[in-house]
Structure formats: C-alpha cells, structure tokens
Image (cartoon, grey):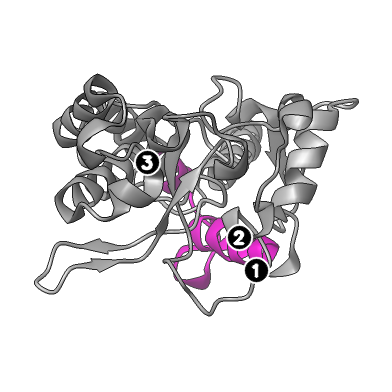
Amino acid sequence: MRTIKKRPAPASLVTWRQQRIAAHGADGLEFTYEAMRRDDAVVEDVEDALHGEQGALCAYTGRRIQLRAGPPRKVGFHLEHLKPQQHCEEGEDTDYNNLVACWPEPNSKESATDGAVLKGNWPSPAEEHLFVSPLRADCTARFQFGRQGQISAAQRNDPAAEETIRRLGLDHRELTALRKAAILGALQPCGRPITLAEVEKLRREMDQDEQELNLGGTIKLRPFCFAVRPQLESENTKLQAIRRCR
C-alpha cells in the first residue's frame, strides 16, 4: 500500500451531509450510506474525487482502477469504508475521510482473493490497532517488497503490518504475480536489463508524479509504484557501483 493524502470532500457531499445534520432526521432526510448512494450526482463526485486523489490506484492493492466519464459512465472500482459500515456510528459511513476507492467494481464476479472484498467487516473496534490504514503517514514504510513481488512487514515484530497483509490477502499468489510483473516490466524494458540512465529517468518521473498528485494534480500513478520504487533504488545502487569499478 501507499500513503493516500486526502483532499477536501466534494462540495456536493459536504452540502448533502450538512442538510441532513441540520434536519436531525426530519423531513425524511436519511443520513446513511444507502441514502447517499441514491443521489447519483453526489456519488459521482465522490468517485471522481477518490479516483483523483489516489492516482487511479486501488487504495489497498495498488492495482489500476478505471474511471471513464462517458457517456456511458464506467466505474471500475467500488467505494470502500476504512472503518467497516457494520462498525460505523451515525454519519461515519458517509464521512469522506472514511472512504477510499478499491478494486473491484461493485457486484463484480471477480473472486475474493485479495483487497477490500476479502477484508469484509474487519477490523472490529477491538482490532483497529491491527489495521495499517492507507491514510497513515507511515503506511508505505510498514511494508517491504521483493523483486519477485513478495510482501512482508518492513520491521520485525510488527503485528499490525503482518495482520493487514493476512486480512487483505496482500500476499496472495495472484497479487504477488501482478507485482512481480510490474517490477520486472520496469527493470527489464523491452525484455533487456535497464540502464543506469533509464533508472534515473524513471525515478525522476515517479517522483514528479507523486509530487504533482500531492499538489492536487490529475495524475495516474504507475500500478504498484510502491513496490517498484524500492527495486529501482536497489538497481540504481548496483549500477552506480558497477560504473565506479570501471
């Protein structure tokens, strides 16, 4: 996972919530996620905002998530609650800071092997300390990745990172294979070893993308960028050492 920097909630969602908070349940103004889902304009604004702030990547897995404005509109992800709906108090299930965009799309026939579908109603309030949320500033640093796409806790004795990997299936073979393909695709462009100049160029591009995204830009990050970047750093160190020895 990579750390997500939340942006301000869409104005339409803010207004929608304010009206219902002010009404205190009067006039049939429900204050639930199900009620919000019935307002297409609000839902679309939330989808657009989440897709944008996440750089078009799934909040948990790092897969590419698609959004086509249309017509017809096509949304290849679902709205995920960091704190599961089952455990939300009033208003929390429509709180923008509790929402992220995750693969797969709603009602998908994809098997529940990793990510949000597998997470389900975890964590319970008693287990919140075991969930490494993608909103945590140290989220990216809590996990490490190998060249073959494998994932593990970055530090020994980090039960939260280990439990998050297990609960979200981040070590599932299919997801591991996708990360491996992304890593090898970066390190072996066109099927050959990457050059030092290409490593430095790709590092700069990834840095620029992250910076632009964090400044509010519309950027599609490289899928699994958080797994690719450490391998680029390792390759850079190796190639720099080879150059010095020549």
Foreground of the two, 2 or 30: 30
> Which circle, 3 or 2, is nearer the viewer?
2
Q: Residue at x 24, y 41 (%)?
A: 28
- Gap in angstroms between the C-alphas marked 3 and 2: 18 Å
- Residue density around tag 1, few if under 14, some if 14–19, many if 20 or more, within 10 Å: some
Q: Main secondary structure of the magenta part?
A: helix
Residue 162 lies in the magenta stretch: no
Estimate the spatial distance between the alpha carbons at disc 3 and disc 1, rounded to whole Å.
Answer: 22 Å
Residue 112 image label: 1
- Residue at 31 percent across and 53 percent down: it is 37
Give the image quarter of residue 217: top left
Bin the neighbour count of mark 2 within 10 Å (Cα to Cα): few under 14, some 14-19, many 20 and up: some
Name the secondary structure under disc 1: loop
Q: Is residue 181 magenta?
A: yes
Which residues are the magenta region? 175-200
- Amino acid carrying label 3: it is Gln
Question: Which quadrant does the C terminus fall into?
Answer: top right
Q: Residues under labels 1 and 2: Cα distance? A: 5 Å
**Of the two numbered discs 3 and 1 in the rendering, the one whose residue sits closer to the viewer:** 1
Labelled pair 3, 2 in contact (Cβ < 8 Å): no
Please tell me which of labels 3 and 2 falls first in the chain. 3
Q: Residue at x 46, y 72 (%)?
A: 107
Q: Which numbered dot is residue 117?
A: 2
Q: What amino acid is labelled 1 in the image?
A: Ala
Q: Secondary structure at mark 2?
A: helix
Q: Is residue 237 left or right of residue 101?
A: right
* Image disc number at residue 54: 3
**CB of mark 1 within 8 Å of CB of mark 2?**
yes
In the picture shown, does residue 60 fall above or below 160?
below
**Residue 125 placement (x, y as % from top left):** 71, 29
On the image, the x and y values in percent for residue 221 come to: 36, 46
